[in-house]
Amino acid sequence: MAKVKEKAEFNSNFIDVAQKLAASGATDTDIAFLLGTSKRGLRNWKKENPEFKKALNRGRELSLAYLIAQGIRAAAGYDYTETTTKEKKVLSDGVLVDLPVETVTRHRHQPTDAKLLMFLVAALDRQLGGSNWLSQHKIEIDDKKNINIHLTGEVISNQIDELAGRLSKLIPSQEVPQLTEATFEPKV
């Protein structure tokens, strides 16, 4: 196995490559190996080159934002089009004949998943530095993709505002389902 160099030479072209690798989910160990240095060497590059460190962080932020958006999309449900093609061949007078390709298009709907949405809300709250929600949470999604949230316990409105603000910065607005109702019952 080839030994990686801890003192490998930094190249400014690594900035763009490192951002793309981080966005694709590569770990620091993977990135260090692919750039020909050790993990310690990568740490040194981050200390010595602020743009390199920013690129790694930006790549990870992009990856996280994409995963969050896809998770919310899956939780809220969505419509999509599925197209399949079938090639047909028939035997005519002992000869195999190609018939025109048949294309079938179907409009499908992926239903909402309230449990996934509840998981995402709780996980995002913790991940984004929110307070602990020590209560029961009930999220309902109707056929029109409207979301109703019912929370009980020690949750105050500024915590909800903070969470909503953090989410809006991470997720493109077209991916966020519409919140139509939210009720909060304080813990007694």
Image: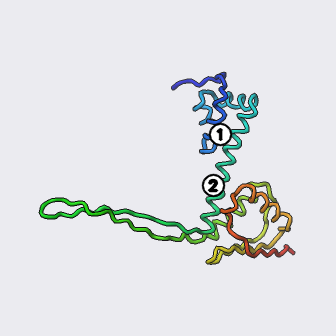
Give the residue at mark 1.
19
Residue found 12% across the figure and 64% down from its top: 93
**Mark 2 = which residue?**
67
Does residue 26 appear to the left or right of 44 in the view shown? Answer: left
For residue 115, above or below residue 96 = below
Q: Position of residue 110 (x, y in %)?
A: 54, 69
Task: Judge whether 35 appears above or below 161 on screen.
Answer: above
Q: Residue furthest front?
A: 100
Label 2 to label 1, Cα distance in Å? 16 Å
Of 125 and 162, which appears nearest the observer? 162
Sequence order check, earlier mark of 2 and 1: 1
From this viewpoint, which residue is outermost toward the bottom?
143
Amino acid type, mark 2: Leu
Left or right of residue 18, residue 79 in this image? left
Res. 157 image quadrant: bottom right
Position of 81 with respect to 28 (left or right) is left
Q: Position of residue 97 (x, y in %)?
A: 21, 60
Q: Is residue 35 above or below residue 105?
A: above
Return the x and y of residue 166 as percentages of the image width and height. Answer: 77, 57
Q: Is residue 141 left or right of residue 104?
A: right
Question: Which quadrant would residue 34 be assigned to in this image?
Answer: top right
At horizontal 72% and vertical 36% (from top left) the residue drawn is 53
